[in-house]
Image: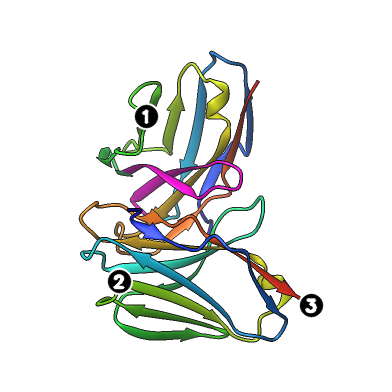
Amino acid sequence: NAGVMQNPRHLVRRRGQEARLRCSPMKGHSHVYWYRQLPEEGLKFMVYLQKENIIDESGMPKERFSAEFPKEGPSILRIQQVVRGDSAAYFCASSLKGQNTEAFFGQGTRLTVV
Amino acid sequence: QKEVEQNSGPLSVPEGAIASLNCTYSDRGSQSFFWYRQYSGKSPELIMSIYSNGDKEDGRFTAQLNKASQYVSLLIRDSQPSDSATYLCAGGGGATNKLIFGTGTLLAVQP
C-alpha cells in the first residue's frame, strides 16, 4: 500500500525558470493539500484540492503559483519564474474525506533556486 | 491571533519522564485535531488523532482535547531520546475549511 508519493525529491532551478512539483495521493484518497516549509519554521498552508476542483487556495501567492488535481494523474504545484525566496520544502498530504480526516504526508520536494 | 498556537520550545525532559506538549486553537468550529511528529529534514508523520472531548491513549501517547477551553495536548510517557523531534498540532473542520498547523514544539529528551 503505497503512501503519498512526491517527486522530484530535490529540484534545483535557476531564477526565472519554472518548477513543477508532483504529488500522487494515497490509493483511494481524493483530497490533497500542499504546504510550504522554510527552515526552522512551521508548515504554511498553500492550497486544498479535490479531484478537478480547488477548494481553498487562500495560502497561495496570487502570482506565479498555481495548482491542479486532474481527474487522472497526480496533483501538480507549479511555480513560474522562480525567485530565491521560493526555496523551501514543499509537502503534499492526502486524506480520504477532507480536513476532518487523517492526512498523510509525502516525503516532500526540496526546491533550491540558484 | 494565530489559528493554532504552540510554544516553540525547546522542551527538554530527561529520559523516562513524561513530556507534555500543548496547543490552543481559535476556531471554535474545529472538529478534528491531529498530532504529527517531524524529525529534522523529514516529513511530518501522523501519530495521534482526536475528535471528541477527553483522552485518547495509544501506547506511550495520550492526546487530550478540551473543546470548551479550545485546548489540545499530547502526553508522551517514558520519553526516549528517539522521541526528540518537533511535534506539530493541527486542527481541521472549522470555518476555514482547511487543515491548519501550529508552528511546532521542539522536544529534546536527554539521555
Report the amino acid beneath label 3. Pro
For the residues beneath circles 1 and 3, the answer to whether they share a chain is: no
Toward the viewer: A28 or B31? B31
Question: Label 2, on which residue?
Answer: B70
Mark toward the viewer: 1 or 3: 3
Question: Label 1, on which residue?
Answer: A61
Q: Is residue A109 above or below residue A63?
A: below
Report the amino acid beneath label 1. Pro
Q: CA distance from mark 1 to mark 3?
A: 44 Å
**Residue range corresponding to the magenta coloring:** A29-48
Q: Secondary structure at mark 3?
A: loop
Locate the C terminus of chain B by quadrant.
bottom right
Q: Mark 3 Cα within 10 Å, few/some/many (few <14, many 20+)? A: few
Q: Mark 1 Cα within 10 Å, few/some/many (few <14, many 20+)? A: few
Q: Position of residue A42 (x, y in %)?
A: 50, 50
* Left or right side of A85 for A103: left
Rendering quarter of residue A108: top right
The answer to whether the residue labelled 2 contacts the one labelled 3, judged by CB atoms less than 8 Å apart, is no
Q: What residue sits 43% from the left and 32% below the top?
A: A77
Q: CA distance from mark 2 to mark 1?
A: 30 Å
Question: Label 3, on which residue?
Answer: B111
